[in-house]
Image: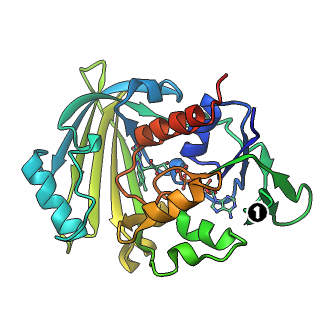
Amino acid sequence: MPKVIILGCGASAYIVKSLYPESIIIGKASLTPTFSLGLHYIHNKNVARLFPSEPLFITTVIDGQEATEETILKYKKKIYGESNRRYNNKPHQFEYCSVGYKFDIDKSFRPDIEGKVKSVNIKDKVVLLEGNGVSEISYDILINTIPLNIFEFLLEEDRRWSKDETYQFSPICVHIEQHPHISPMRIGNLVVNYLSNPVTPIYREVTCYHRNIVTYQSEHILTDNCRNSWTKAVINPGKLLNSGNYEYFVSILRNRNIYCLGRFAQWDNKIMLEDVYNDAVEILLDNRITN
Ligand SMILES: Cc1cc2nc3c(=O)[nH]c(=O)nc-3n(C[C@H](O)[C@H](O)[C@H](O)COP(=O)(O)OP(=O)(O)OC[C@H]3O[C@@H](n4cnc5c(N)ncnc54)[C@H](O)[C@@H]3O)c2cc1C
């Protein structure tokens, strides 16, 4: 079997490790992965099985209205601009009403090798780490989950592929409140509201009624206001603007046995963890990696 190295230890790395336990994760616990922030939910049962999870009814609305082809398109045009080419079909995250799962990452999840990646030598297929201890790790297949804007600068080769591209994003902060709640329902309810008003820094609200607790989570484009008051954490890069031709860059890396996996590593804001799962299965199948 080829030696599979995963860079980063967030949810994408967790999914690959669950599918292929022989893979080796390199990551740094102190670099906060986005997964540790906030409430997470998913629609797909196969993916939910990999995590400690519980079922929910999920309702998705846009500016408080039902998510239809029309409201979604209107929303996307407002957020990403008229000319954005990534207006694909209705993504599953906008499913109006569905059964889904609230889930968490297994708290015992740790990288196999604790360290911050300093650079990647594509030619020799070696990852170099900062600091003492193990400093060089070879790979046959590299699965990168580190955000692409950082990863690009870890490559030792000339970065000619994306030099014309700029990485546009808005750091976001997540605010969470929890209160006791008396629910007559056995299965929880979750409502996701996507907001498109450009003058409102909140762009998504999630309210979850589950096990006598109501959790309200709002995701904000970072402003000085929210930085200073009740901010739980700042996510960087946060909200990505799908502005460049990153698919091309990612495909060039793939030809060199480097697979970028996850929302930030692929620089594509529509990616949810179910997409990560599908992509991870495909990477393993393509390389004939089975358990
Ligand atoms: C607020 C918010 C809520 C979301 N909610 C959902 C949801 O409910 N459901 C869903 O399906 N998706 C959701 N997403 C989208 C996405 O699927 C998740 O953010 C997911 O957790 C991303 O995981 P990841 O592993 O790809 O990236 P990350 O969690 O960002 O992991 C990247 C890893 O790279 C590491 N790293 C960075 N630099 C280095 C370095 N130099 N050396 C070593 N390691 C490094 C970091 O430590 C981190 O471990 C959400 C996104 C956001 C921002």
- For label 1, the SS is loop
How far across and how far down the image is residue 212, in percent?
35, 29
In percent of width and height, residue 190 lies at: 27, 36
The number of numbered discs placed on residues in the rendered structure image is 1
Residue at the spot of label 1 = 123
Task: Look at the image and tell me in which quarter the C terminus lies.
Answer: top right
Using the image, determine if residue 157 lies above or below residue 52.
below
Q: Residue at x 51, y 57 (%)?
A: 251
Q: Closest to the observer: 254 or 147?
A: 254
Q: Residues within 10 Å of mark 1 (few under 14, many from 20)?
A: few
Which residue is located at x 21 percent, y 38 percent?
95
Viewer-proximal residue among 41 and 180: 41
Q: Give residue 261's position: percent from left, percent from top.
A: 53, 49
Residue drawn 16% across the image and 70% down it: 82
From the viewer's side, name the closer residue of 112 and 190. Answer: 112
Question: Of the residues shown, which amino acid type is indicated by label 1?
Answer: Lys
The answer to which quarter of the image holds residue 131 is bottom right
- In this picture the colour scheme is rainbow
In the rendered view, tell whether residue 6 sits above or below residue 79: above
| Image quarter of residue 253 | bottom right
- The quadrant holding residue 121 is bottom right
- Visible residue check, residue 196: no
**Residue furthest out toward the front:** 255
Quadrant location of the N terminus?
top right
Q: Is residue 12 visible?
A: yes
Residue 277 picture location, percent across and down: 48, 36
